Image (cartoon, rainbow, N blue to C red):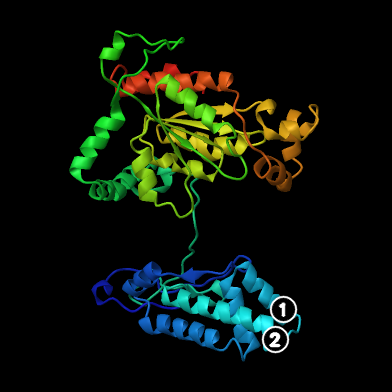
Amino acid sequence: MIKVEKDPKLLDIRTVDALEIVQTSSKPKLAYLSKILIALLSYGGVPNEFLLDMVEKALGDANSVFSSKRAALRVLVNHGEKDGFTAAGMILSGIPLDETHLQNRLSILMNDEKKSLKGGRIPIPDSYYLMGTADPTGILKKAIVGVKIHDDLTVDPSLMKGNKSILDFRHFLDRAYQPRIKGSIPDKEQGVQLKLNQWASVPTLGQSMKINKDNQKHQVKKPKLVILSRSGSRALVNKDCLVKMAEDMGFRVEVSRPKRTTELAKMYGLLNKSEVMVGVHGAALTHFLFLKPGSVLIQVIPLGTDSPAETCFGKPARELGLKYIGYKISPRESSLYNEYDKDDPVLTNPKGVIRKGWQYTKEIYLDRQNVSLDMRRFHKRLLQAYDYSFKKINRQISYNQTTHLFKLC
């Protein structure tokens, strides 16, 4: 444990005087510092000498990869990627450090390690360090420290000071991202985008969706629909058909494919101005937190994902105040329909298959399944979302008058 420096301003504050770690989990994964963490730890009182010592040790290992097997292994493991583990396996199998191929790999990884250190990516040895404490006075009393889990993508008010909820977190996102969004687009450009994106002539509402020429003369707001597109598993195969159907219905449509490197402020700016979001069950649906309360989330639920779909996104979305529609696909809408016999339990009894273990869920339903929507069937859900969002943004309906519109949820 690395103790922080004393803070004279807090010497009279009651605190604890001891901290004992009596149990740990299994050995944790590799952990690293970053520039931001280093700044926070330094500000919080962690001695700079300790942080500099970590850098010097990591740099010493990087410079010793050609002469010390122990140092080489530390650098290779810290690198953590396939090339690093492959080279580490060569050393552990007895291949000498002066072997030509190994020397080449070590040289490349050594340079990568030095670049990472320069950028603040400093490995934490064994990942067991407790860096910083809640005791700037240096006087600790016995206490038990733990983590309380609220639930998936939600906030339990009973565990929060002031009974704060997920809505408070949503307001926090507004305060964090709105200044960045407003500052990134000039005022004139914002005005032009607002006119182009929000005002246009749209078809008259109704089951037939026939265009009424008289109503074309009136300018009304068109609801915006964002489709989250996935690559790899659980991809929406007929996405283009969905786009066309939504545009014909009257939506302004934008397809987004967020990546790990996509800036969150960009996604906030997109979804905060949208009325409806559609996506297949997956981690990217976490972006629903950027939708305003009262917006619509349509989750496409592949075979075998009913439970996580409800737990991870359905329940949290409703708690955020979204109008949630869960669209459970039929076996014919799954790519698995072409891989298995029509009476195979994979198609007819997903719950039974899931009970066999997580590996079956992952290998079959998460990693090998794509979706091709039945447009006739999905049209009902999308029209439901359109009717609601159209009336809402054109002030034909109040927020509190919308429950009856979502009987299909």
- Residue 102, position in %: x, y? 67, 81
Q: Are marks 1 and 2 in contact (CB under 8 Å)?
A: yes
At label 1, counting other C-alpha atoms closer than 10 Å, the crowd grade (few under 14, some 14-19, many 20 or more) is some
| Lower sequence index among marks 1 and 2 | 1
Residue type at numbered disc 1: Met
At label 2, counting other C-alpha atoms closer than 10 Å, the crowd grade (few under 14, some 14-19, many 20 or more) is few
Mark number, residue 321: none
Q: Is residue 363 above or below residue 199?
A: below
Q: Which sits in the foreground, 202 or 59? A: 202
Q: Is residue 164 visible?
A: no
Mark number, residue 90: 1
- Report the residue at 71% width, 46% height from top: 363
- Report the residue at 25% width, 77% height from top: 8
Q: Nearer the viewer, mark 1 or mark 2?
A: 2
Q: Which sits in the foreground, 323 or 340? A: 340
Would you identify the image quadrant in which residue 303 lies? top right
- Residue 294, position in %: x, y? 37, 29
- Report the residue at 26% width, 19% height from top: 219
Label total for image: 2
Residue type at numbered disc 2: Glu
Outermost residue, left direction? 188
Q: Is residue 222 above or below residue 167?
A: above
Q: Is residue 11 above or below residue 199?
A: below
SS for dot 1: helix
SS for dot 2: loop
Would you identify the image quadrant in which residue 69 lies? bottom right
- Report the residue at 62% width, 43% height from top: 233
In the picture of the structure, the residue carrying the numbered disc 2 is: 99
- Residue 115, position in %: x, y? 46, 76
